[in-house]
Amino acid sequence: MAASGVAVAQTKEWSFGDGTAAERWSEVDAAYAACDAGHMQSPIDLVDPDARATVELETHFGTAAGKLSLGKQKVQIDFDPGQDKGMKSGDTQYDLLQVHFHTPAEHAFDGERHPLVAHFVHATEEGRLGVLGVMFTEGEANPGIAALLQAHAKGNGTALTVDIDDMVPDTLAVWRYMGSLTTPPCTEGVNWHVANEPVEASAEQIAALRAVLGSSARSLQERKGRLLVAPR
C-alpha cells in the first residue's frame, strides 16, 4: 500500500518479489530501512487475535469522482478533494485520498490470500494514515471494478466516477491493528482496518487486474507482539 500525499518512493526501482520471501528493500535504498528494521510492518496474517470486539467504524462513501493514476504494478484512483468521503474509526475522522489494488491480497486470513484486494487510503487533518482493506472473491461482476477497467482502457489521468459502496461489504466488520505502508518507505503508524467479509468480482475482472498488476503483494510480516482485534 502506497499513500498519496505522504512520503513514498517516487520511482519504482524496488520489486515485490514472489510475495513469500523477504524483499530486503533496505538493500535497495537506505531510506527504506524501516521495511526491514521496523517493528510495525504490514501486511500480516490475520489469525489468533488478542481480542474480539466490535470495532467502531463508520464509513461515508457513495459516489465519488477522481482520476486514474497508473504506473508499474499500480492501478489507483486519486479522489478529487472536497467530496466529504471517508471513515470514522472510534473518535478519529479520516478523509479518503485514494484507492489502489493488489493481486493477490496482501493480508492473509490464517495463511490464505484472496485473489484481489482494494486498499482505501485515508488521512486525518494532521496526516495520520488509516486504511480500509477489502478483499475480493470470485463471483458476480462488480460495478466499481467495471468502472475502473473502463477508465483503464482510456489510459492514465482518465477522469471517472465510481460508487465506492460497490467495493465495500454491506455489513462491515473489521480486523484492526497498527501497521505500516506495504511499499517503500514502509512508513509505520498506519491504522489498519481489514474487512472480515469479501465482496465479489467476476473471474474476468480479477484476471484483467492481475494482468496489469502481476504479483503485487508484499510478503507477510511478523506481528511482533502487536495488538490484533478481530470482529465478534
Image (cartoon, rainbow, N blue to C red):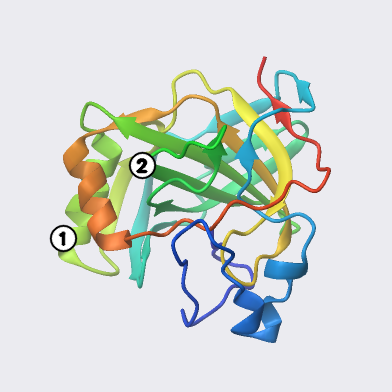
Query: How many badges with numbers are in the image?
Result: 2
Residue displayed at 56% across by 65% down: 183
**How far from the left and from the top, in percent, is residue 38?**
77, 64
Q: Quadrant of residue 195?
A: top right
Q: Residues within 10 Å of mark 2 (few under 14, many from 20)?
A: some
**How far from the left and from the top, in percent, is residue 55?**
70, 24
Q: Does the residue at mark 1 contact the one at mark 2 (Cβ under 8 Å)?
A: no
- What numbered label is drawn on residue 153? 1
**How far from the left and from the top, in percent, is residue 222?**
71, 50
- Is residue 57 found left or right of 81 in the rendered image? right
Mark 2 residue element: loop
Residue displayed at 65% across by 43% down: 192
Can you tell which of label 1 and label 2 is closer to the viewer?
2
Please give the residue where the numbered disc 2 appears in the rendered image. 115
Q: Residues within 10 Å of mark 1 (few under 14, many from 20)?
A: few
Q: Quadrant of residue 24?
A: bottom right
**How far from the left and from the top, in percent, is residue 74?**
38, 64
